[in-house]
């Protein structure tokens, strides 16, 4: 994909080819439907992110909002970035079991799930993981990880 200079998530999706938008829009909706109050959708790192704003939690290591998850159309695949899975072994197990139960292969890096088709993503499992943290719980998790 070419570098996206969108200033909003709606513009980011509108700038995508139709086939990419048709894949990412339902994933975005799953995130929004399951995201706890206090997280906000924005464009950070040139992709749609779901984060804790600096007005709520300003003391991050990089002085940017604390990212909870993100969504992106990469050059050769799409990706969902789930920071909670990277830092919470129980959620990683839920993710792995969810993919296995759905008969899907999990193509994952440390916190990114790579996929080319919507059928490769069990949206119910993604929704469950997104819904697993409230803002204060994720901040507590962040502090716990930073101490390690």
Image (cartoon, rainbow, N blue to C red):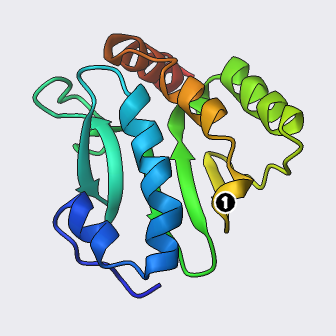
The residue labelled by disc 1 is 114
| Picture quadrant where residue 123 is located | top right
Q: Is residue 69 above or below residue 74?
A: above
Considering every residue shown, the one lying at the far left of the view is: 55
Residue 56 in sight here: yes
| Picture quadrant where residue 4 is located | bottom left
The image position of residue 25, as x and y in percent, is 43, 57
User: What residue sits 63% from the left and 23% below the top?
Assistant: 88
User: Which is nearer the eye, 93 or 28?
Assistant: 28
User: Which is nearer the eye, 86 or 107?
Assistant: 107
| Picture quadrant where residue 126 is located | top right
User: What residue sits 61% from the left and 45% below the top?
Assistant: 111
Q: Is residue 57 left or right of residue 20?
A: left
Badge count: 1
The image position of residue 101, as x and y in percent, is 87, 32
Residue 68 in sight here: no
- Quadrant housing the C terminus: top right
User: Which is nearer the eye, 96 or 31?
Assistant: 31
User: What residue sits 57% from the left and 27% below the top?
Assistant: 129
The image position of residue 120, as x and y in percent, is 73, 55
User: What residue sits 69% from the left and 41% below the top?
Assistant: 122
The image position of residue 114, as x and y in percent, is 67, 60
Label 1 SS: strand
User: Which is nearer the eye, 85 or 121?
Assistant: 121
Label 1 Cα crowd, 10 Å radius (few <14 / some 14-19 / many 20+)? many
Considering every residue shown, the one lying at the far bottom of the view is: 2
Q: Is residue 146 above or below residue 40?
A: above
């Amino acid at each position: 994909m070419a570098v996206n200079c969108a200033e909003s998530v709606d513009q980011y999706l509108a700038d995508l080819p139709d086939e990419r938008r048709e894949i990412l829009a339902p994933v975005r909706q799953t995130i929004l439907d399951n995201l706890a109050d206090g997280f906000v959708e924005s464009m950070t790192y040139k992709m749609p992110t779901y984060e804790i704003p600096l007005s709520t939690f300003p003391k991050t290591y990089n002085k940017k909002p604390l990212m909870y998850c993100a969504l992106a159309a990469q050059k050769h695949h799409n990706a969902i970035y789930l920071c909670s899975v990277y830092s919470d072994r129980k959620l990683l197990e839920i993710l792995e079991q969810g993919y296995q139960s759905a008969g899907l292969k999990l193509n994952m890096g440390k916190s990114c799930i790579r996929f080319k088709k919507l059928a490769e993503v069990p949206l119910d499992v993604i929704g469950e993981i997104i819904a697993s943290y409230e803002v204060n719980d994720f901040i507590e998790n962040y502090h716990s990880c930073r101490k390690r």
